[in-house]
Amino acid sequence: MIPQQQKPPLIWLNVILFTLTFAIATIGVPLYCYFYKLDLTLVIMTIVAFCYCGMSITAGYHRLWAHQSYQANCFLRLIFALGGAFALQNSILHWCSDHRVHHRHVDNNLKDPYSAKMGFFYSHIGWMLRQYQASRYHDYSNCIDLQQDPIVVWQHKYYLFLVAIMNIGIPVAIGVLLGNMWGAILFIGVLRLVLSHHTTFLINSLAHKWGSQPYTDRNTARDNGVIAWLTFGEGYHNYHHIFENDYRNGIRWWQFDPTKWLIKGCSLLGWTTNLKVTSADRIEKTRAKMEFIRLQYKLKTLPNNSVRLLQLQYEYEALISKISDYYQVKKRLIDLRQKKLVNNYESFEFMQQYESIRQKLKQQRRDWKYLVQQYTV
Ligand SMILES: [Zn+2]
Ligand SMILES: [Zn+2]
């Protein structure tokens, strides 16, 4: 905690904006629902506007611009740039600069702009309420690449104008369309903004506090399926912090990551290209390494542990080597299939070899899982 007298000055604009919008949403919306009948079209439009803001941040600001995990055509970039102004989370350039510092110096209270080690409130919203890192506020030297993107430069230059157009223009236009000006301003103007703000802020606060750490415990980032539902898939934050250039955050098919689906869906239309993914063997090895470190740590606390430690080491090394063997042979199989050589005699032998390596890995995975379960109960 920083003593009160040493705290940097408040940024009054942010304090007033966050307080006022939050107060209007939490008091105004229940009052509106009490006195007026809620219009379904208004509710649907609020949800659409909320999703537009959220995905502009997750797919645009975060995965496209901050991490360059894929490329997008100018139409999509323009849509995201406008959505980012609608979400009122600063310009792309500024947001990405902060976010790249966050990844580079995660949990470092002096450098990480929203370090989770400063506490929940600070990482959620507190970091924006005072001039904590005023010295680097206009330093965009870590975003030279983004300064080559004319849409990023344009959005940065006209940011406040775009904020006004999006945040006043859209609710007013919908208000005229529905014949319900106050309802549109309250729901699409204010409620949507507050929900969009706080769900995004959860990624910096709650996703660094609540959940599991299957890939690394070297930072506070967590994987959490519940947070993923609130943040358009950004809840798999432990994975994201270790493989930040992957366009996916939830890598399994059942993991809720609509941002990933949007990017993939757009690639089918040719709007997004060069989608980066981490190789499956690297992911599996990273996960196994984390389990190995945890188990090793646990075993060291037990008496007479030398034999068990040796067994753990042996099983871990066997798993890593079998993962390497399998993915190597799988890569060859894909090559052969591409060259359509799978049907001749030589490939029959190869298929037998492939199957045997696959079975060996399957068995080793089972043995490893059993070992992990033995010590985690
Ligand atoms: Zn983070
Ligand atoms: Zn990130």
Image (tube, helix red, strand yellow):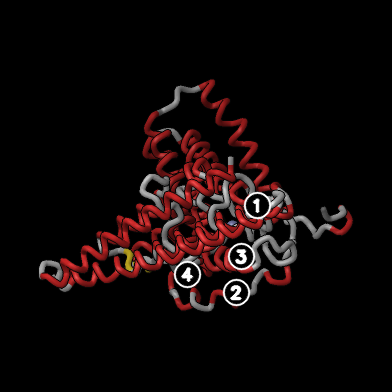
Q: Is residue 180 visible?
A: yes
Q: Which residue is mark 1?
A: 299
| Of 151 and 274, the residue lying toward us | 274
Q: Which residue is mark 2?
A: 140
92, above or below 200, in the image? below
**Distance from the alpha carbon under mark 4 to that under mark 3:** 15 Å
**Amino acid at pointer 3:** Asp
Measured from the top left, where is residue 310 in percent x and y?
Answer: 59, 60
* Residue contact at pointers 3 and 2, CB within 8 angstroms: no
Q: Residues within 10 Å of mark 3 (few under 14, many from 20)?
A: many
Residue projecting furthest to the left? 344
Write the residue at 62% across / 51% down: 208
Q: Residue 152: which disc? A: 4
* Residue contact at pointers 1 and 4, CB within 8 angstroms: no
**Amino acid at pointer 4:** Val
**Distance from the alpha carbon under mark 1 to that under mark 4:** 51 Å
**Distance from the alpha carbon under mark 4 to that under mark 2:** 12 Å
Q: Which quadrant of the view contains residue 218? A: bottom right
**Amino acid at pointer 1:** Leu
| Residue at disc 3, secondary structure | helix
Q: Which residue is mark 3?
A: 98
Depth-wise, is mark 1 or mark 4 nearer the camera? 1
189, above or below 365, in the image? above
**Amino acid at pointer 2:** Tyr
Q: Which mark is first along the chain, 3 or 1?
A: 3
Q: Residue 265 vs residue 165: left or right?
A: left
Q: Which mark is first along the chain, 2 or 4?
A: 2
Depth-wise, is mark 3 or mark 2 nearer the camera? 3
